[in-house]
Amino acid sequence: MLAGAVTKGVGVVRKPVLIGDFLHRIKRPIHLDPQSRYKLVTVKLYHKGVVLREEKSGADIKSNMYQVKEGDFILSGIDARNGAFGIVPPELDGAVVTNYPH
């Protein structure tokens, strides 16, 4: 839960705000073309953002994949507690991820 400041009288009162009030989950499963190349992304630990992991041919990717778009907020379900979350930058628009980051 996050708190936003709400002015009330002479003091400041904190109004609870749930993250679900302003974020919602989007999954974009993608069927990979074996002849195409895809950018795979990873989410770095300690607030270091979303970066290119590698590029691969669709024929070399065996997992179910999901597409991310510029501006998406993504996080690692395993390492979010270690700061593994970030916003997809413009250069990774349309890239793919495995095991959809939450």
Image (cartoon, helix red, strand yellow):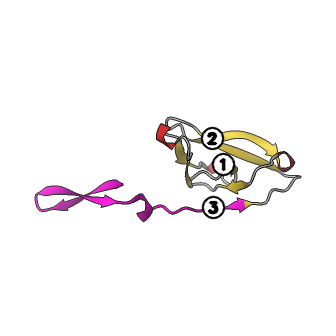
- Disc 2 target residue: 51
- Disc 3 target residue: 27
- Which residue is outermost to the right? 35
- Disc 1 target residue: 92
Does 60 sit above or below residue 13?
Answer: above
Q: Quadrant of residue 70?
A: bottom right
Residue at left offset 59%, top offset 48%: 89
The amino acid beneath tag 2 is Val
- The region drawn magenta spans 1-29
Q: Quadrant of residue 67?
A: bottom right
Q: Position of residue 84 (x, y in %)?
A: 53, 41
Asked if the residues shown at circle 1 and circle 2 are in contact, with their CB atoms under 8 angstroms apart, the answer is yes
101 within the magenta span? no
Q: Tag 2's secondary structure?
A: strand
**Left or right of residue 6, residue 9 in this image:** left
Q: Quadrant of the N terminus?
A: bottom left
5 within the magenta span? yes
Comes first in the chain, label 3 or label 1: 3
Comes first in the chain, label 2 or label 3: 3
The amino acid beneath tag 3 is Lys
- Which residue is outermost to the front? 78
Distance from Cα at disc 2 to Cα at disc 3: 19 Å
Distance from Cα at disc 1 to Cα at disc 2: 8 Å
